[in-house]
Amino acid sequence: MKDKIREIYKNIVQNSDEMKFQRERLEKQIETLLEKERKEMNITEYERYRDQYYEITLLAEESGFILGFQYAMQLIAECGSGVGSA
């Protein structure tokens, strides 16, 4: 199931205009955070930290989508079955 959700994320969501907009905001935030430290690092060190931030961020983004999708499907299933209704 997670593989199918991941496929939806990679093929549809990841390339959406909204996701591109959010990613640009994120890149600016990462650059702002690293700018404070940039003066104390050489370019190789800076790029290594930047790449690690991006990697962590993309993993968190994908994981958040998968969890949100699973919770949404669970909620839809519960609503459809009448579980928890008075």
Image: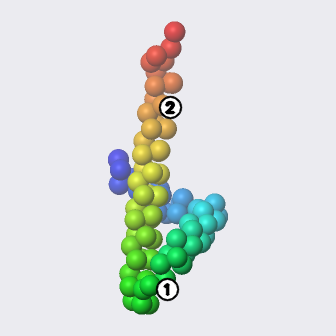
Q: Dot 2 lies on which element?
A: helix
Q: Nearer the viewer, residue 56 or 18?
A: 56
Residue 28 is situated, as x and y percent measured from the top left of the image, at 59, 72
Label annotation for residue 39: 1
Q: What residue did someone put label 2 on? A: 76
- Scheme by which the image is coloured: rainbow
The amino acid type found where label 2 is placed reads: Ile
Identified at 52% across, 71% down, the residue is 33
* Image position of 51 (left or right of 35): left
Dividing the picture into quadrants, the one containing residue 54 is bottom left
Identified at 43% across, 70% down, the residue is 53
The CA span between labels 1 and 2 is 51 Å
Vertical arrangement, residue 84 with respect to residue 16, above or below: above
Please identify the residue farthest to the top as the structure is shown: 86
Earlier residue among tags 1 and 2: 1
Residue 27 is situated, as x and y percent measured from the top left of the image, at 55, 71
